[in-house]
Image: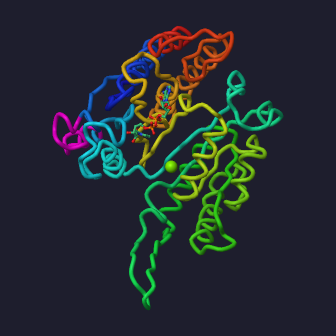
């Protein structure tokens, strides 16, 4: 099959890590008989330098017209980069918000997987790290508290601020469907996280997720309160497969879940729209401190490309081939600097990409 991918290298290490992910996609294409074509799109600092804004309308239109988007990272050294004096809506990071909004990306997926080869980086106690974990947090991205009505005003002489946490049943249903679809490709368990003992929006969440579950009889649905979930993530992360939750809870829980893996250079992510369209990017930023030095770990971006194969292109076997190759590279003791430990072989960004391609 032919797929047209919009590629946004971005700033800092972005171009280096994206090049390795493209190399991996090309290797998958050759092996499995697909062709991937790429259209490069400017975003972030690169776009500011060329066009004066972090994302042009043309760039957004190109991304929209593609089958999926692969993104590196944007931004420089905040406070010091050449874009620093620009107002926030014209800084590189504003491109991220604009493209997420422009593409209607309402579901944010953040896997947290502990490789046994890297369990030394896991901050949890040894018995928990030994058990391992493999979960994916599905966060609602365009509703809830971050998008509700807000105001700050003086009430009876007292400064008062209000944020609104609002969800309608359609917003809840579409993210729940995504979560169950993802669970069908995994271990068939969904844990829905809310605060239904207090919040009306969570009660509706609970009810709609329970309704959606009826269409997926093979998937086990469990409800969990958010404060308990925060505890369970560090106590027994192995119990989680797919976690679905609203925007703010997901923001906090996905950061917590990713940090129990201990390694930022390994963490992939996806943001999905209606249908099969999605944007795929590593969870980390532009890492300006190591940019241009062939030191970056490309694995987060390569695993994001694997998510693209699975969720946008329905190429499960191909995605698995990439994930297995990453696993093999780690088993073979090959490491970039961020995951380096005693007795391992250190390689650069390019060499890591090559090693993964060889193993596909
Ligand atoms: P960062 O994630 O870029 O870097 C944090 C630390 O992790 C640095 O020491 C960096 O060298 C290291 N690191 C990150 N990715 C790595 C990789 N693949 N391999 C090896 N080491 C890696 O976060 P920071 O420093 O807070 O932000 C730098 C810039 O990136 C800022 O302008 C920020 O706004 C932007 N940013 C962009 C994001 C995006 O494009 N989605 C997300 C987060 C930050
Ligand atoms: Mg966050």
| Percent x, y of residue 57 | 20, 45
Quarter of the image with the C terminus is top right
Please state which of residues 326 and 313 is positioned toward the viewer in this rendering: 326
Left or right for 271, reference 210: left
Number of dots carrying numbers: 0
In magenta segment, residue 3: no
Q: Is residue 342 above or below residue 266?
A: above
Please state which of residues 190 and 95 is positioned toward the viewer in this rendering: 95
Q: Residue furthest front?
A: 80
Residue at 53% across / 62% down in the picture? 172
Quarter of the image with the N terminus is top left
| Percent x, y of residue 194 | 64, 63
In which quadrant of the rendered view does residue 326 lie? Answer: top right
Q: Is residue 218 above or below residue 34?
A: below
Residue at 70% across / 54% down in the picture? 229
Left or right for 153, reference 44: right
- Magenta span dominant secondary structure: helix
| Percent x, y of residue 71 | 38, 33
| Percent x, y of residue 25 | 43, 20
Q: Residue furthest bottom?
A: 156
Residue at 62% across / 55% down in the picture? 215
Residue bounds of the magenta highlight: 47-63
In magenta segment, residue 50: yes
Q: Is residue 208 above or below residue 73?
A: below
Q: Residue furthest left?
A: 51
Left or right for 250, reference 3: right
């Amino acid at each position: 099959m032919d797929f047209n991918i919009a590629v946004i290298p971005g700033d800092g290490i972005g171009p280096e890590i994206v090049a390795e992910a493209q190399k991996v996609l090309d290797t998958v294409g050759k092996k499995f008989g697909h062709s991937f074509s790429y259209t490069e799109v400017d975003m972030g600092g690169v776009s500011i330098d060329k066009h004066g804004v972090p994302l042009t309308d043309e760039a957004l239109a190109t991304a929209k017209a593609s089958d999926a988007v692969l993104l590196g990272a944007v931004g420089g050294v905040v406070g010091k980069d050449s874009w620093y004096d620009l107002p926030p809506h014209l800084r590189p990071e504003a491109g991220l918000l604009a493209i997420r909004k422009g593409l209607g990306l309402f579901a944010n997926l953040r896997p947290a997987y502990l490789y046994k080869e890297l369990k030394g980086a896991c901050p949890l106690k040894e018995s928990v790290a030994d058990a391992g974990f493999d979960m994916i947090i599905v966060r609602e991205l365009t509703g809830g508290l971050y998008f509700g009505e807000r105001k700050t005003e003086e009430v009876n002489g007292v400064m008062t601020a209000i944020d609104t946490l609002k969800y309608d049943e359609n917003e809840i249903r579409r993210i729940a469907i995504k979560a169950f679809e993802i669970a069908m490709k995994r271990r068939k368990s969904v844990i829905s996280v809310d605060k239904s003992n207090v919040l009306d929006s969570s009660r509706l969440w609970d009810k709609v997720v329970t309704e959606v579950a009826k269409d997926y009889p093979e998937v086990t649905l469990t409800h969990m309160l958010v404060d308990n979930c925060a505890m369970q993530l560090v106590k027994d992360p192995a119990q989680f497969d797919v976690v679905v939750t609203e925007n703010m809870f997901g923001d906090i829980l996905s950061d917590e879940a990713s940090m129990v893996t201990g390694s930022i250079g390994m963490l992939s992510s996806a943001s999905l729209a209606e249908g099969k369209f999605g944007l795929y990017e590593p969870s980390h930023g532009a890492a300006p401190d190591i940019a241009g030095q062939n030191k970056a770990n490309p694995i987060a971006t390569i695993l994001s490309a694997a998510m693209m194969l699975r969720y946008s292109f329905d190429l499960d076997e191909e995605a698995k081939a990439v994930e297995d190759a990453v696993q093999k590279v780690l088993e073979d003791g090959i490491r970039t600097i961020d995951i380096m430990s005693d007795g391992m072989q250190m390689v650069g960004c390019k060499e890591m990409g090559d090693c993964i391609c060889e193993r596909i």
